[in-house]
Amino acid sequence: RFSGIDFEIIIIDDGSPDGTQEVAQQLEKIYGSDKIVISLCISVLKLFLFPSGTAYIHGMKYATGNFIVIMDADLSHHVRLLFMYSGKQKEGNFDIVSGTRYKGNGGVYGWDLKRKLISRGANFLTQVLLRPGASDLTGSFRLYRKEVLQKLMEKCVSKGYVFQMEMLVRARQLGFTIGEVPISFVDRVYGESKLGGNEIVSFLKGLLTLFATT
Amino acid sequence: MTKLGQWLCGLALLGSAWAALALAPPGLQPPAPLRQALLPLPVYLLVAFGCYSLATVGYRLATFNDCEEAAAELQEHIKVARADLRRRGLRL
């Protein structure tokens, strides 16, 4: 099915009692524990929680490929889009390929007007303040060259949405090249991405911190 | 230089230029019409930027794509994948 691309899947479980481990073990039995790596390959980190730095670091230890793709595991990011990431990376030999919901035919499903407004407003503010050279900074569907991800993990300190932003901002600082592909984000298939007052406040705090320190 | 640094430098530059021209002592003042336009300029620019921001965010909000087909396709794929995994022995 993934003709031409070798891949392996790394599942990171935070130990919460939602049955993840049992399913993962069954999958391992079905597909074999050596989904393999020869020349170009993509490790897919499927994170069952909102991605956090420790999960990335943990997963990277097991990854044996040249590139690492990080994506949400609640099916809001579709695996078939990986072809586009791979293609884009080869096209420009990019260090990072970032999925954008805001350009081309990228978009979302399952968001009401208020959510979309907040998203666009926050992104506008980010563009004005940080001029980051990428259209979607809070998305979490990205492909990284393995060494690049390792380098960035050392430097990034924030959490949550801001962590995703910091990764791209630091990448630009360090001179890494970033390519973009439009992606569709299908929300609310399993679980809903949260956006309460807390998230907004911490986003603003993080944005201002990045503004003042990068 | 940090982004904050860039903004402060830019504002300091523009601010001092504006102050030099608009608030100059009587001997060095530019002609009256120019002064009349210069004095409220900062406020005008702020308002203009506010309008631009509203217009831009409004436009982007209106053109925010809704991925109907992606969602429908995903449901299809989930069904197929579930059936396939069940065949191979996965029990949820």
Image (cartoon, rainbow, N blue to C red):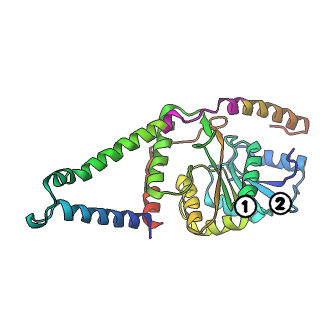
Which residues fall within the magenta stretch? B60-72
Residue A77, given in percent of the width and then of the height, sits at 69, 43
Q: Residue at x 32, y 62 (%)?
A: B11
Q: Nearer the viewer, residue B81 or B12?
A: B12
> Most prominent secondary structure in the magenta stretch?
helix
Q: Amino acid at mark 2?
A: Leu
Q: Residue furthest left?
A: B26
Q: Earlier in the sequence, mark 2 or mark 1?
A: 2
Which dot marks residue A40? 2
Residue A28, given in percent of the width and then of the height, sits at 86, 50
Q: Chain of mark 2?
A: A
Q: Residue furthest front?
A: B31
Q: Residue at x 35, y 67 (%)?
A: B9
Write down the residue under mark 1.
A93
Q: Chain of mark 1?
A: A
Residue A86 visible in image:
yes
* Disc 1 secondary structure class: loop
Residue A20, given in percent of the width and then of the height, sits at 74, 46
On whether residue B61 falls in the magenta region, the answer is yes
